[in-house]
Image: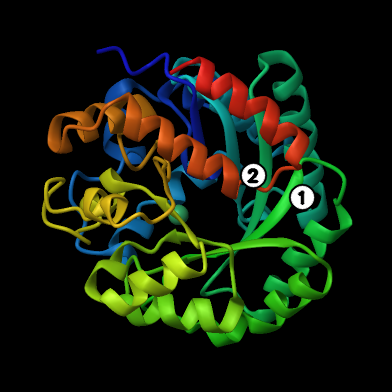
Amino acid sequence: MNWRTLPKVELHLHVDTSLSYAGVSELDASVTAADYQRDFAGPAHCDDLADFLSHVPPILNLLQTERGLQVMIEDMFRQLATDGVVYAELRFAPFQHLRGGLAPRDVVRIVEAATQRAVADSGIESRLILCSLRHFDPDQSMQTVELVNEFKGSTVVGYDLAGDEAGFPLERHLESFRYAQAHHISITSHAGEACGASSVWETLDALHPPRIGHGVRAIEDPALIQRLKHDHIHLEMCPTCNVQLNVFPSYAAHPINQLYREGLSLGISTDNRTLTPITMTGEYERLATTFGWTNREFLQCALYALDAAFLPDTLKTRLRERIIAGH
Ligand SMILES: [Zn+2]
């Protein structure tokens, strides 16, 4: 079965850790394929999320200039096209791209303009989510969510909290989420990846997000599964990345199939494509091989993800027709 051509929706994709070797070469021609594997791609197995995050800096070093950020988007869209993605939400933290002298607002302006151009050129729909990170100070979170508000009406549509969930508490960033709520900004948040079901409960109760990044450790708590179902919370799932980060010992041990059979709304994403060597097509192949998933499950997950997308209904309707026609 060729899963590549199925129309896909990817909601959880860190664009600042997704440069392919071709993208890296455009920015630094001296990097060989072997260098890329050694210095940029993540190890097959990490101890935990903190270990994984320690491999991020080399790729970020290339993304500190206007040109670096433009190539980041152009390279991303080439990968999305190859992968059959028809709608992608790309996320990044503006404060990670300031070392070349850009201000956070410049970073967003450059990435936003590049995204608009790429959408027009490729026919792939896309929106941007600005991230704060757990270890950032609360003021950086506030500035990040204020940028989402400032860029309203552009492709910038959402706010997310990512980073080391085990090392830094959520409460430092609550004010930024209160701002998001007051300004009708769409939110999602990482939870239930490095930490257990309690982190999902905490995130649901404190932030009331319509979506959770990962959330997979909900499998540890049947009451939480019921809560997610009852409140129609969508889970952005990235199975290969979870296994790489040692959240589960193997792909077969990942609870995505079980949570899907429970009737939860969930979608499939890669999380990132530099540190985690996976594509959406590759993820589909693994789901098919490991759990026997077919067009039926892939269509349902794409539609769940589209329903949860930060998009106006008119655009969702158009994309829904395209996705159904492609299955
Ligand atoms: Zn993530």
Scheme of image coloration: rainbow
Residue 64's disc number? 2
Residue sitting nearer the eye, 15 or 236: 236
Residue sitting nearer the eye, 292 or 192: 292
Residue 99 appears in the picture as rendered:
no
Instruction: Give the vertical position of 287 relative to 130 (above or below).
Output: above
**Secondary element at image label 1:** loop
The residue under the point 16% across, 38% down is 291
Residue 205 x/y as whole percent: 53, 83
Residue 103 x/y as whole percent: 79, 55
Ligand 1 near label 2 (Cβ, under 8 Å)? no
Query: For residue 122, what is the image quadrant?
Result: top right
Q: Earlier in the sequence, mark 2 or mark 1?
A: 2
Query: For residue 144, what is the image quadrant?
Result: bottom right
Residue 227 appears in the picture as rendered:
yes
Q: The disc labelled 2 sits on which kind of residue?
A: Gln
The residue under the point 85% across, 51% down is 151
- Distance of mark 2 from mark 1, alpha carbons? 8 Å
Residue 102's disc number? 1
